[in-house]
Image (cartoon, rainbow, N blue to C red):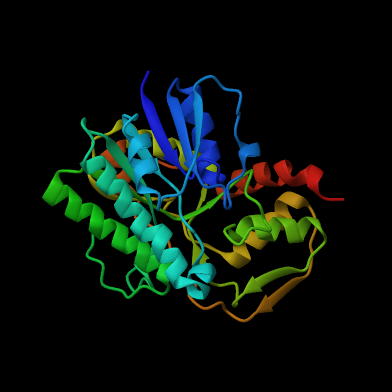
Amino acid sequence: MKTVLITGGAGFIGAHTVAFFLQKKWRVIVYDNFSSGQKSRLDLSHPHLKIVEGDLLDFPLLRETIAECDAVLHLAAIASVPVSLETPVHTLKTNLLGFVHILEAIRHAETPIRLVYASSAAVYGAASQLPCNDEAEMTDKVLSPYALEKLSNEAYADLYARTFQVKSLGLRYFNVYGPGQDPKSPYSGVISRFIEQYQRGGPVTVWGDGKQTRDFIFIKDVVAANLKAIASDYVGVLNIATGQAQTLNQVIDSLQSVGGKKVPVEYAAKRAGDIYQSYAVVNKAQKAIGFKAETSLLEGIRELMLSYADSFP
């Protein structure tokens, strides 16, 4: 039985991925400091699940834990643009130094360890060239410390591949949504927040004019991409997205279509660090690891709304 270490395994993407790997007969080690992750998301009684409560900055513990594994899926991060703008030194330590610790632990391991890590669509910055192409040179300036940290992760991964033969694959997740995403969390996506506001009768608050676009990808598709990435030997970076641009106004229309009622919508000032237009080229992921997103926005919103149904009066 192969063993995968999933950092941030008690987070939104992490917990879904842990459950999927266990289902696929992997032994899973969750490495999490539980600053935002929740143990309640995990099946703690599962015989093939091990929990290590630790921080990415604790290099001795991290190195000891990684030594047990065949593969590492690095999801742990302070994954918030606003938080990174408020506390850039704090996020730098976790998001960049923590990643270098993982690279160093794998570099010094006695046997080769497959590394897949979460990057972000934020690395594309203002995205003057659309769609965002994972085969093009990065030319736009990033808009937040979080984006710069993720772009730096990719640069360090490339350096370690060329210099130390630590081969890795970075997954540039676009806007992930799905059941289990806490709409009150500062790390949550816009769709879960919209749904909470919608199911309370509104108003739904949009930061900006609502014409900004995103490439929304459902959690089940992201989890499938994670497994395909671990199982492959591809080295580099890949967009994990649908290839479809949706405006926030279209998302609200979809909510109202699925929910069967209209609620008020309020428009507020645009947030600092937010990208205006974003959607992805997805051909490379299909060729490299056989991944293609399968869930439409309407299907995903319907499933997410059903999962929240019992949470609202």
> With 311 as the anchor, is 252 left or right in this view?
left
The residue most toward the front is 60
In the picture, the quarter occupied by the N terminus is top left
> With 173 as the anchor, is 211 left or right in this view?
right
Q: Can residue 132 be seen in this snapshot?
A: no
Report which quarter residue 302 is drawn in. Answer: top right
**Percent x, y of residue 274:** 49, 72
> With 159 as the anchor, is 301 left or right in this view?
right
Q: Could you tell me how many numbered marks the image carries? A: 0
**Percent x, y of residue 50:** 50, 29
Report which quarter residue 73 is drawn in. Answer: top left
The residue most toward the left is 163
Q: Is residue 93 above or below residue 101?
A: below
The residue most toward the bottom is 269
Residue shown at the point (45%, 64%) measured from the top left: 91
Q: Is residue 138 above or below residue 286?
A: below
Residue shown at the point (41%, 75%) measured from the top left: 143
**Percent x, y of residue 138:** 26, 67
